Image (spheres, rainbow, N blue to C red):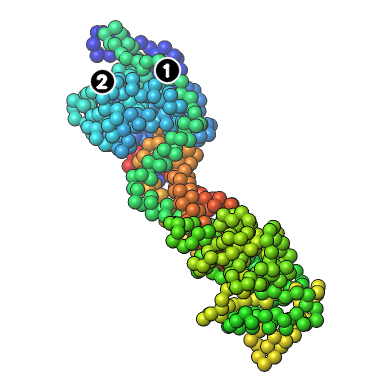
Amino acid sequence: MSGKGEEEHVLEPKSPSPIISLRNASRGFPGTKALSGVHLDIYSGEFLAIVGPSGSGKSTLLNILGLLDTPTAGSYLVHGNDMGEVPAAERASLRARVFGFVFQESHMVGRDAAARNAVLGLRARGVAWKEQNRLVIPTLRRFGLEGRAATPAAMLSGGERQRLAMARAVIGAPDVILADEPTGSLDTANGQIVVDHLRELQLTGTTVVMVTHDPAIAATADRIVTMRDGEIVEDTGHKVRVHDDAHEHTYVEGGQPKLVRRRRDEIIDLTADALSTLTIRPAKALLLVLAFLLGSGGLVAAVGLSESAAVKVTARIDAASNDEVRATRDGGYASWKQVSTDLAASRLLSGVVDAGVVADLPATEAQPATFRPGAVLEAPAFIGGVRIADAAYLRLQGATLLSGDSALLDNSFGAPVAVLGQGAARQLGIAKPGPGVVIWLYGEPVAVAGIIDDPGRDPVLEGAVVVGVGSYPIASTKVNASLVLRTHTGAPAAIAEVLPKALSPAAAEAITVQTVADLRDLKHGINTDLGRMVAIVSVILLVIASLSAGTTMYLGVLGRSQEIALRLALGMRKSALASMFLMEGAVVGVLGGTAGSAVGVGAALAYAENEGWVPVIPATAALWGIGAGLLSGLLSAVYPAAVASRANPAQLIRG
Ligand code: ADP
Ligand code: MG
């Protein structure tokens, strides 16, 4: 019956039902029929060779057996279950459990170590690390590769790579090994080693189905199926050779692996894969991160800037609730005497309750400091506003002092005087006013006359240094001071009418009057001008970042098509494959978003300080930046992920 030597025991199959069987199965492709009406029963423990000329349908048959492809007519049964009735996801997990694949090309991930390649199937199935580690060395040892565990697969010889492919195929203890021309790219000696290993696997209970065009190799099998033009033209019939004492085999220690899926290991593994693809081209990855950085950084800066501007303006609008009028003189004031004249003139108008003056100085020029400039190195820069005001201004804003006397702002007996908002006092390290307590402004000592308790209607006062009108000499430059009038409720409109003429009878147009309505426009203007422009530019940057990351990833998918097909063939779920790419996008996006948030906050702070605004950067702005990076990173990966999970393992491996 066998003609292959006296020591072999040839038995009828133990189980009467075949492990896999094709029933009248056909597979058509546009223009050809690769398989037509094939019947084939394969029993557990068989060593079967499929032979036939090129194009006769051998690979098509093997792909259908391995659940990489489905018949277009007829049916395929695994353990008696019709695979046509099983959903695709379940077929994929069945494929990973029941079948191990060895191809003509070993299809290794060249940059990864042999050990990592050996467990690729286990990783694809989300098997716990502990289990992977328990199996990998014994399995490599079984194929004589334990000394090569750490060697990148690309550095192995052809024979070693094919043995590694066998290690990868059997590590999950499949029922059936499917090998398509496993010796096709090897010399005779290495080819023989591969066949010997396959025989050993069969003798330890694995069913082996091997496609070969080499008659000498086919002759070593127990059963030969010959194909021609998509049909089986000859079948020597099934029989099973069993293990005898002449053969000694090493099983993987610990017996059959318990291949439990471990969610945490799987997620960390996917992240590691995502990171490793990024590190292959670090310069490119860095550029992508930079693109996301600019986009999300701009967004954070936009939020910070418009918030800071809005607080400054909203403070005034709220304060000016229908009883405030402000006036400025074109070109500013040349002297405090002129300011006093205007204040006196406006107090005479009917409906005016009180009148004060306020002007903002750029903090960067005034450089408020605790110590004489140069006395300490690298004193931290003051963040906040510097205002010139009189006692009336504080009074009509409803501001109150914690200690000290605001009257000193108007009459400081020749010495420069300031009162501090509590925020400013804290920054400058001033606990309370008193004789000899000074801060430095424009490099000059300024006596601290008081500390503001409640900033009243002007929240900016909280963080500001308020310098008395008399203290600030108007020399070469004019000061853009605003007169602020407190009026009876409802009076601002009427007062706004008459004020220019009252202050400047000869040239009323030199006086600009603002009421609440004007201030609303101002707020609108600031928010749209700056915040919106920065936001638009940032969104454009984010879209560009997302597109370029998407393109890079898409090209990556094309370049890694073999590896992707392999992962799918080894049982990776399409959802896991997609999340691998989403993870890659998310990592780049979050890195860029985080760095961008830091840059954006810094830019907004610098700008606000330069403008003399109190910087108000909402704590959530940074989260917005990270979120924007994450979102655009994920978006960039959607298309590549979709393309990757549409990959067909049968097609790709054939190519
Ligand atoms: P073998 O492995 O025996 O050389 P194949 O199974 O690869 O043969 O191919 C059998 C026939 O089916 C060939 O004519 C081949 O061109 C055709 N074929 C295989 N795959 C495809 C495909 N994806 N699209 C179209 N034709 C295919
Ligand atoms: Mg083929």
Residue at 41% x, 38% y is: 272
Q: Which residue is mark 2?
A: 196
**Image check: 469 left or right of 30?**
right
On the question of residue 212 being in view, the answer is no
Residue 356 horizontal/vertical position (percent): 70, 74
Residue 651 against residue 493 in the figure, above or below: above
Which numbered disc, 1 or 2, marks the residue closer to the eye?
1
Residue 26 horizontal/vertical position (percent): 42, 35
Residue 355 horizontal/vertical position (percent): 72, 75
Residue at 43% x, 20% y is: 257
Q: CA distance from mark 1 to mark 2?
A: 22 Å
On the question of residue 331 being in view, the answer is yes
Residue closest to the far bottom:
506
Looking at the figure, which quarter contains the N terminus? top left
Residue 491: image quadrant is: bottom right
Amino acid type shown at disc 1? Gln
Label of residue 209 in the image = none
* Residue in front for this viewpoint, 353 or 168: 353
Q: Are marks 1 and 2 in contact (CB under 8 Å)?
A: no
Helix or strand or loop: what does disc 1 sit on? loop
Residue 456 against residue 356 in the figure, above or below: above
Residue at 77% x, 72% y is: 322
* Residue in front for this viewpoint, 142 or 244: 142
Q: Earlier in the sequence, mark 1 or mark 2?
A: 2
Residue 446: image quadrant is: bottom right
Residue at 28% x, 14% y is: 2
Q: Which residue is mark 1?
A: 256
